Amino acid sequence: MGFTNMTELFYPSQTLGGPNIDIEEIITSQNIISRFMHSYLGILVPLGLLAGVFCIAILFRNKIKYQALDNLDFYLLALVTTDITVILYSFTSKTRPGYLEISNLSCGVLSSFFNVSYYFTQYLLILMFLLLLITDDSTTSQSRLRCVLLTLTLSIILSIVNVSLLGTHDILHNITYCQLDPLNAKPGYDIMKFTAGFGFPSLVLLIFTILIAIQARKMEISGKLQTHTVTLCHIAVMFICRLFYNIMLIRRAGLKVYGFYLSPREELVLNISELVVFSGSCIRLLFTLVLHKPCREGLKKSVRFLINMCSKKETSNSVI
């Protein structure tokens, strides 16, 4: 089957014979995105994965040691796991400045799984932010698990609704250039993703921020704010990274609605914004390792252990 695009919006780099396409601009854009991709894969991905694995190991060790996890640790464990899956999904972008060439069916399945992680991270952070407003920390493990499962269920439902708006059900076996948010999706897909994955959650977070600011002035949660610094940093990083990406989603939807073409520069910015979302997951994992006290203490102990091991080895070698 040939390449098919139901929205008539194409990647300039893949349609060199199209109108209004500057070859030199395409070459420049491809060089830039290649450098961004190499920096992301060579620096942020290894650091993010190492930080994520280390955080999971420390949190599980504390669970075994103390036979319990507090609320923040429990939700951070779920968040760290999800951020790692987002990083793994980002490997589908390693072909930049090229794209995956797969069927619309495969692209839709890939997009649906990615959207589950995308929505779950967003709504789990809202749940964690809600903890700052709750003065009672005596939540049972069953109720915490129930909250996470409800959040996951909501994410799956939103993902299914989102994928149903792709508009490729009539050409499932046709080959397409695939991104995690496919370019050949109908405008409704982009609008739904913006609304459910950024617009509504940002409004909820704004309301929570106002309530927390009111409580902080009354000195009701000043101690909690220090404990939940990692949550606040997670929310800030996610908002900044996803703001850039969602602006490009709306821009992309506008191009589809009004029948405009995608310029090489817009293709470049769209690809960079996608990498910014992936980079946000790496940065959040590093923040968890550095800012969350149990993870930070575990990191310090591991560093001291390695230093002691190296010093003992050097001492034994000098004696020999």
Image: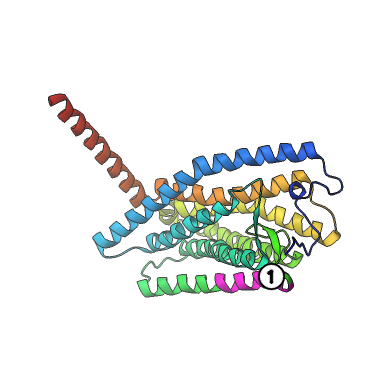
Task: Indicate the position of residue 108 as horizontal and vertical percent values.
Answer: 64, 67
Main SS of residues in magenta: helix
Q: How is the image coloured?
A: rainbow
Is-magenta flag for residue 168? yes
Q: In the image, 250: left or right of 240? A: right
At x 71% / y 53%, what residue is drawn? 248
Residue at left 58%, top 74%? 157
Residue at 77% of width from left, 62% of height from top? 5
User: Among all residues in the image, which is located at the extreme left?
Assistant: 319
> Of 39 and 145, which appears nearest the observer?
39
Residue 202 falls within the magenta-colored stretch: no
What residue is rendered at 67% in x and 37% in y? 31
Q: Report the quarter where the N terminus lies.
A: bottom right
Residue 173 shows in this picture: yes
Q: Position of residue 209 (x, y in %)?
A: 56, 58
Q: Local crowd at mark 1 within 10 Å, few (<14), some, or many (≥20)?
A: some
Residue furthest out toward the front:
1
Quadrant where the C terminus is found in the figure: top left
Question: Would residue 237 be seen by someone viewing this image from the given angle?
Answer: no
Amino acid of disc 1: Leu
In front of the other: 16 or 312: 16
User: Magenta span covers which residues?
Assistant: 155-170
Q: Position of residue 109 (x, y in %)?
A: 60, 67
Label 1, on which residue? 172
Under circle 1, the secondary element is loop
Task: Give the image location of residue 132, x and y in percent.
Answer: 47, 61
- Residue 35, above or below 228: above
**Left or right relative to 191: residue 148:** left
